[in-house]
Image: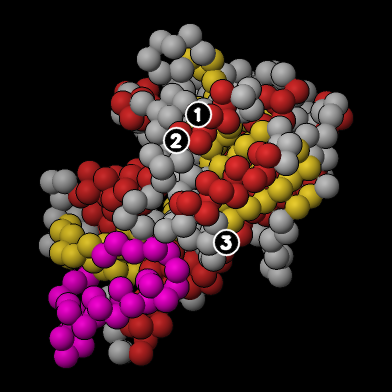
Amino acid sequence: MKINNLAYPLYKGRDRHCGRSRYLKLCVPNNYLLGWLLILLCSASVGANADTQWSTPMGVYNPACTNGQFACWAHPSNQLAQLEQVVYTALDANEVENKHHICVSFPHLKDSYWAGVAYGIISEAKRLQQKITLLEAGGYTNLENQLNQIDDCMANGADALIVGPISKHGNAKQIDLIRARGIPVIVIITGIDTVIDANSLQSFSNMGFTTCQWIAQQNHNKDTQIIWFPGPPSAGWSVAADQGCRQALQGTSVTIVDTKWGDTGKAIQLQLVEDVLQTHAPNNQPEFDYLVGTATSIEAAVGALRARGLKKKVKLVAYYYTPGMDIFIRRGLIDMAPSDQMITQARVAVDQAVRLLEDLPMATGGRPEYGQTGRFTEHVQPPIVIVTPSTIDDFDSRTTLAPKHWSPVFSVD
């Protein structure tokens, strides 16, 4: 089913229009009304009942960007405004014949973003009755730790790997060796520059672009200065977000006056914010209009601005969504944060892994891989949802935020 590239909530449910192997591909004009009518075909949120088969709107890369070629992302048909949209319908648990051991590796679980990803992985694995070993490396500086953890997990008989790589280059050789053994690899969230079997992966270039484009639109023809906190300097997602933001600001009246790179640990980001305020806000008179960056950066900025009496002088925008963003947007302390629906991405990654292990068709049918390699693979991403104080009541946060009081578990049997 083809739909326009708007901000849709995540939906579950199964009817005769939303069966697994019969994904719909109807041409729908680019308008909101028909887009929302389409959503109603698969009528309730996937977060409402984790045991129920679900369907959701999803962008499909065509060609698929699964062979590590950067040029694929820049292909005209893969640009955000042109990205093919379909309804992705997950497997019914009754369609899965075997329990497989799936190794899942994250850069860390230090913030609520990755806790949301963990919730999506664990809940979908339970729904499909799969065995999960979840690993976290402790931070974006711990590449060697992630590599060792994955080696250990694979040595313990894992049938597939779902990985959020710390480094788009540093993880590549290990992934090549794993795939050479016939073990499928699915990449989630952070991206990699080598051949894999499937992507459940939002373009963080699009996240950065969408965020900075929104700021430019709010400040049309008005000189505006921002301080930019893209995240870890070596992570593929933060580098992509930086590129996307800068692309969006070309030819606009918005200027990046300083860029602060750093790991997304709370202490590190708070120190970066404090450094900026000391340098660019002498005598509590800020020389900028916005602080923009990772959710951890913006959470730190809320308290730092309040302590200096600057919360009415500086606007705050994050380029992805967390529970902290949800709380502060509701309080009117943050102007905007877009959701990449990371719980959706995680659920899709598990569904992709099980399909590969069971030799079942991909939910979208697959697309030719970039570069005419002869492979048909799948690279999908949920629509980006822009959330502001005026739209937050319409946002279905179950696509993005783990339930309150949920804590990550590291194994599912």
Residues at marks 3 and 2, CA–CA distance in whole angstroms = 22 Å
User: Residue beneath label 2, please?
Assistant: 172
Q: Position of residue 378 (x, y in %)?
A: 55, 24
**Residue 153 position by quadrant:** top right
Per the model, the C-alpha gap separating discs 1 and 3 is 25 Å
- Name the one closer to the observer, 168 or 400: 168
- For the point 21% across and 88% down, the residue is 284
Residue 31 appears in the figure:
no
Q: Which residues are magenta?
A: 260-289
Q: Name the residue located 41 percent from the left edge and 83 percent from the top edge.
A: 303
Q: Position of residue 367 (x, y in %)?
A: 51, 17
Disc 1 is placed on an element classified as helix
Magenta span contains residue 276: yes
Q: CA distance from mark 2 to mark 1?
A: 6 Å
Label 1 or label 3, whichever comes before in sequence order: 3
Task: Identify the residue at image location x=57%, y=61%.
Answer: 109
Which residue type does callout 3 highlight? Leu
Image coords of residue 78 (percent x, y): 38, 27
Q: Nearer the viewer, residue 205 or 52?
A: 205
Q: Earlier in the sequence, mark 3 or mark 2?
A: 3
Residue 289 placement, left or right of 6: left
The kind of secondary structure element at disc 3 is loop
CA neighbours of label 1 inside 10 A, class few (<14), some (14 to 19), many (20+): some
**Circles 2 and 1: CB atoms closer than 8 Å:** yes
Amino acid at dot 1: Asp
Residue topped by disc 3:
109
Q: Which residue is mark 1?
A: 176
Q: Amino acid at mark 2?
A: Ala
Q: Does the image show residue 205? A: yes
Name the residue located 52 percent from the left edge and 54 percent from the top edge: 145
